[in-house]
Each structure stands twice: as structure tokens, then as C-alpha cells.
Amino acid sequence: MPDTPPTALIPYLTPTHHRLWCEAENFAIYQIASRVGPMEAAAHKVERKAAHLMAAQGWFGVTLPVQYGGMAAGHVAKTVLIHRVAAVSAAAATILQAGLIPIGALHHWGTVEQKRKWLPRAADGSVLLSIAVTEPDAGGRIGGIETVAEPADDHWVITGEKLHIGNSHLANLHVVVARTAPPTCAIRQSLTAFLVEDDRKGVSLAPHRRRLGLHGFSLGRLALERVRVPAGNVLGEVGQGFDVAMSSSVLYGRPNLTAVSLGLHEALVETTAQWLDSRPRYGGRLSDLPVVRDRLGAMQARLQTARVSAYHAVHLLDRGIACDSELISAKHTGHELARTSGQDGMELHGAHALDGDYTLQRLWRDIQHTYAPAGTGEFQRIHLSKAALNIPEIEWSQYFTAERAWTPAA
Ligand SMILES: Cc1cc2nc3c(=O)[nH]c(=O)nc-3n(C[C@H](O)[C@H](O)[C@H](O)COP(=O)(O)OP(=O)(O)OC[C@H]3O[C@@H](n4cnc5c(N)ncnc54)[C@H](O)[C@@H]3O)c2cc1C
């Protein structure tokens, strides 16, 4: 039966959010849960079915306006969908979140023509997108991007390599950030974002490889060998690639990964509590022991903190209130708290969770994957220290107030 939202979230949820909560819960239980086993068993394969099922729900359009076929439901709604799916399958939730980041970028930065062409297809899921920023030698340092785009008549020619690209094997359209000015130029003028169709000559993907966790999620290596794209495929203006990448990361990537961590955290606590409550010891159960309860209580406290911080941040975002540091802190803390609970959960299971097909092991593996994307812990703390020191930074949550991508769901 569908779960109901915890009372702590009631202040953040409208009737639309409640409806989506039930829909996502049902969907995860009846359509995704049965896929978890096969996805774990075939870690070398990309999961396509879950992507298509979520696309059929219209969820890739959750933040898009109705005029483009979207749900216009906002960021809290997006968090509800990702969170509820992640509680059942973090890999499936990561497919959804990774697709939503470039869709946000296209909506915020696209021309009217680009939006008319791509957004309806993104909303109905007939086109899936990826955002390709990370590179082998640049990592989280966007300023180190070496992929180059050079002008040639009315085209650009892009050459370079992108790594760890979410949904790369599913996407029909990649948002690629490339260098269009020498490294000596200021970073905010040096990069440009491009829409690159997956069937353009020179685009290639290395085969999908098994990773520690998130089995089924494609996190691939994308090569661009003298790929010609028309000038009309520039997303934003030439030189605005840094802004496209950063705004997408802060407004979409961070809250999306927060929601994945939160779903995993809930599953970690629930799995551990059930185990402790069923394991016999001294004529009772392990959950009767005070020391064990103390650790479980700490897990529950962390979960409750993570839950409120995740929803509070996107609630502010939906209302157009400056909230970059809340988004960043929720992502950072949400991962840290869930990872700590994951370690507690593993230890409270003794040797049992070391069995390969044990649920907790999957959760523990998956939670390692929400640290790096959309800013590693170090980068988040650098941003947050600037908030503490009152050092001004661009507030991406304020940047788009003139043309908001979402309206709070009624
Ligand atoms: C699940 C998942 C999904 C992802 N999806 C995408 C995607 O869709 N598109 C995309 O482009 N990328 C994606 N990534 C890649 C992700 O953005 C990068 O992993 C991340 O930016 C870090 O880069 P890196 O792994 O190369 O680590 P590095 O940048 O090499 O960093 C290694 C370590 O050094 C630290 N470090 C580096 N520089 C500094 C510094 N200046 N100060 C302090 N510490 C520093 C880092 O914090 C980290 O601990 C994804 C990754 C994962 C795991």
C-alpha cells in the first residue's frame, strides 16, 4: 500500500504534491521494484526499460511549462518523484534526475526555436537528454575543460572527451560544454554550451561498464571527434557555458542528488530496523538491546534532519527565494548523513550484509555515488564557507526570476 508523507513534510506539500507522492510510490512499488533484481544481476547492462516507464509518466516534464507539454509542477514535485523512486531503486531515480538536469538547462537557456523543437519531445520522453561537463583531466574544475569548439562558417567544430556522463547511453541529445576561448580568458567568458544530437558524425560512446553501484545507470565516456554542429545549436550565448553548467548544477543537479540520497537513507533505516526487529537474541530480539537502539536512534535522527533540509531547500526554490546555500547544504549534508547511516546499518547487520545479494549492500554501494556529482563535498564546503564569511557569489536561485521555469503546484 502507498505510504503517506511523514508529518514533518506536510508544510511543504500541496494537494498536487500529495497526489504525486502516491503516484510515484505506486509506480515504484508496482513497476520498478521488480526490475531491481535484474538490474543488480546485469550490472554490465544499461537499464532502458525504467527510463521508458518514467518517460511514459511524463515525469521528464515535471518542471516544464504546460505550453511545452510539461507538468509545471516545480522543484518540490521533482523532489517527490525522485525521492520516492530512490527509496525503491536509486539507479532508476538517478536515471530520472540525470535526465532532468539538461532539460532544465534547455528551458532556462534555450532560444524559442530550440525550446519549441526539443522541449515537447523531452516532456513526453521521446527524446532523452544528458549534460556533458566532466572530463578526464578536469574533474569537478569546470575551468579546466579542454574540449574545444572552433567556429567554421556557420558551424562549430567540437573535439574532446567527456567522462562519467549520466544517461550517456540513453540520450538522443547531449548538452556539451566546450571551450571557445583560451584558458587565459575569464572563465565566465571562456566556455559555451552546445546541443549535440547523438547521431552526429564524430560522436561516439565507449561501451557501458560495471561500476560499484547504481547498476543499470549509464555513466559513460563520450568522445567528440571533429563534430560539426550548426550555430543554431549554441545553447545560451557564446561564452555563457559556465553559467549554463553552474546554474544547472546548483538548481537541478544538487536538489536531484539530495532526493536520491534521501530515498536511499529511508531504505537504509527501514531495512536495518526490520532486521534488528527480527533477529533473535537472549530470548528477545536485537532491537531490544539499548546499545543497538542507540545506534538505530541516531540513524533515525539523521534521516529526519536530511528529510527536512531536502524539502525546505526546494520549497524555497519554488517560491523564488534566494536559497543556493540551502540547496548546496542539503546536497552535502544529505549525502554525509545517509552515508554515515549506511555504515551503521552495515555494522548492525554483522556479517550478514556482506552477502552479495543482500539489499543493504546495494544501498551501501549506491550511496557512495551521491558524493561526487553536482559538486563533491570539498566544493560544497568551499561554497558554504563563503556564505559563512559573507563573500558574495552568484545566486543562481535568483538569476531566473524574470522568467521562472516553474510555478508552485497548487
Ligand atoms: C552518479 C554520478 C552521476 C554523474 N553525472 C554526471 C553528468 O550527468 N554529467 C557530468 O558532466 N558529470 C557527471 N558526473 C561526474 C561528476 O560531476 C564528477 O565526478 C565530479 O565533478 C568530480 O570530478 P572527478 O570525479 O573527476 O573528481 P576530481 O575533480 O578529480 O576530484 C577528486 C577529489 O579531489 C577533490 N578536489 C578536486 N579539486 C579540488 C579543489 N580545488 N579543492 C579541494 N578539493 C578538490 C575533490 O573534491 C575530490 O574529493 C557524475 C558522477 C556520478 C558519480
Image (cartoon, grey):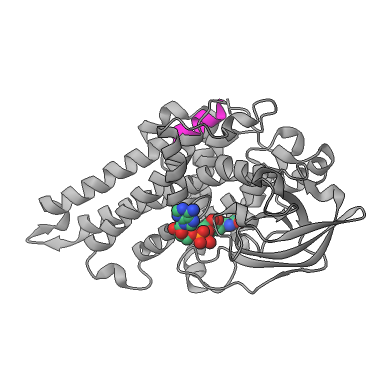
Q: Is residue 210 above or below residue 57?
A: below
Q: Residue 20 at what x, y percent from top left?
A: 54, 38
How far across and down, in percent of the image, does residue 33 sit? Answer: 48, 58
Quick one: 98 or 250, which is closer to the camera? Answer: 250
Of residues 51 and 316, the one drawn nearer to the viewer in this rendering: 316
Residue 53 appears in the rendering: yes
Q: Is 169 contained in the magenta span?
A: no
Which residue: 21% across, 55% down? 277
The residue lying at 15 percent from left, 62 percent from top is 280
Q: Confirm whether the magenta stretch covers residue 314.
A: yes
Residue 104: image quadrant is top right
Q: In which quarter of the image is residue 52?
A: bottom right
Compare residues 178 and 361 and report the one nearer the observer.
Answer: 178
Nearer-the-camera pick, 291 or 230: 230
Question: Would residue 299 appear left or right of 6 to someone viewing this image?
Answer: left
Residue range of the region highlighted in magenta in the rendering: 310-319
- Residue lying farthest to the front in this orientation: 184
| Residue at 37%, 61% in the rendered image | 364
| In the rendered image, the vertical position of residue 52 relative to residue 352, given as above or below | above
| Left or right: where 261 falls relative to 342 | right
